[in-house]
Amino acid sequence: MLTRRLLLGPGLSSLGLSSLGLAMTFIEPAHARRHPRHRHPAARVPLVMLDPGHGGKDPGAIGVSGTYEKHVALAAARELRRQLQADGRYRVEMTRGRDVFIPLEGRVAIAQHKGAALFVSMHADALHDHRVRGASVYTLGATASDAQTAALARSENAADRFAGPAFRHASPAVTRILASLVRQETRLGSARLAHGLVGSFAREDVPLLDNPSRHAGFVVLKAADIPSVLVEMGFMSNREDEAALRKSHHRARVAAAMRRAIDAYFAQLGPSRGAPLRYAG
Ligand SMILES: [Zn+2]
C-alpha cells in the first residue's frame, strides 16, 4: 500500500512532494474534487503566495525618518510579483495587494485556501539597536534562535493568536502520521528555500545580518503544509537600510535575489512543482 511504503521507506528526506501529494489524495479523495488545481490543467503552474507584512491600521515598523514598513513591504512584494510573473512559470498572488489590515492567521488561511506551493512573507521591521542592519531569513522554530529574533517574533505576533492547522476529516491515527510526514516535508522545503535566499542575497550583494538564517515562532510561518519563510529585507530602525528600501532600484535588487532563490527551489523540486500537500480543508 502506498502509505505503508511511504512510512516504511528509507528516510523521509528522499520523498518527493508528489508522492506525499498522492498519499493525501489516496486518503482523502474528496480533496481532488475540491481543489481547483485538478479542475483546470492550466492551473498546475505552482502558486507562490507573497505576503507583504502589516497594512491598514498596522503600519509595521516606522523608520528613523518616518517610512512605514507596510509601504516598503507592499512595494517590494509588487516588484517580486512582477519579476516572478515575467516568464509564466508561476502563478503569483499576494495576501494583500493594497493598504489593508489582514490578521496573521488570515494570511496563512489565504495561502492554504488558494493551494499555495510556497509562502513568502516580506518585512522590514525594527530593532532596539539602530546600528543593526542587513537582510535575514526566518523559518519556523519551536524556540527563537536568539534573543533578537525572539523579540522580533513577539512584536510580529502581538496582534494575533495562533489557530492550529486543520486536519479535520481523518482518523486520529492517520492524522498523526500524515501530519508528521507533511510537517517534515514542509520543514525541509522551508529550510531549503531559506538557505537559497541567504545565498542569493550574498551573491547579489544585498547586505546581510550576522547569522542571517534564523528561526522563530512567527505566526505566519505556521502553515503545517506550505513551505514558508519570512524575509526581513532590512531594518527600518537602521538609517541606511531604511534609505535603501525606499529606493525602487534597491527593492528590485532584493526582489531579483529572491526570484533566483525561488527559481532554484522549484527547479530542485522537479515535476511535482510543489503540488499542495493539504488534504483537509
Ligand atoms: Zn514586519
Image: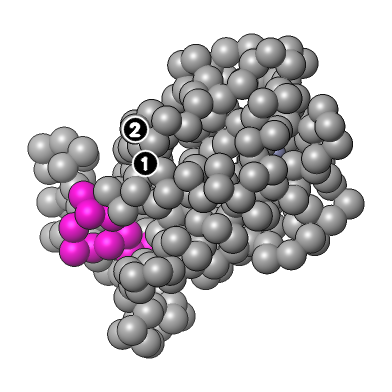
Q: Picture coordinates of residue 86 (x, y %)? A: 40, 69
Label 1 crowd bin: few (<14), some (14–19), many (20+), radius 10 Å: many
Residue assigned mark 1:
193
Q: Quadrant of ligand 1?
A: top right
Q: Report the mark closest to the observer, 1 or 2.
A: 2
Question: Which residue corresponds to the image point at 63% horizontal and 61% vertical from the top-left?
Answer: 95
Using the image, determine if residue 183 lies above or below residue 209.
below
Q: Picture coordinates of residue 274 (x, y %)? A: 32, 59
Q: Is residue 47 left or right of residue 233?
A: left
Which residue is farthest right? Answer: 57
Q: Does residue 167 show up magenta in the picture?
A: no
The amino acid type, in three-letter code, at marker 1 is Leu
Q: Does residue 272 show up magenta in the picture?
A: yes
Question: Which residue corresponds to the image point at 13% horizontal and 51% vertical from the top-left?
Answer: 5
Task: Give yes or no for contact between labels 1 and 2 (Cβ–Cβ under 8 Å).
Answer: no
Magenta-tinted stretch? 266-276
Residue assigned mark 2:
203
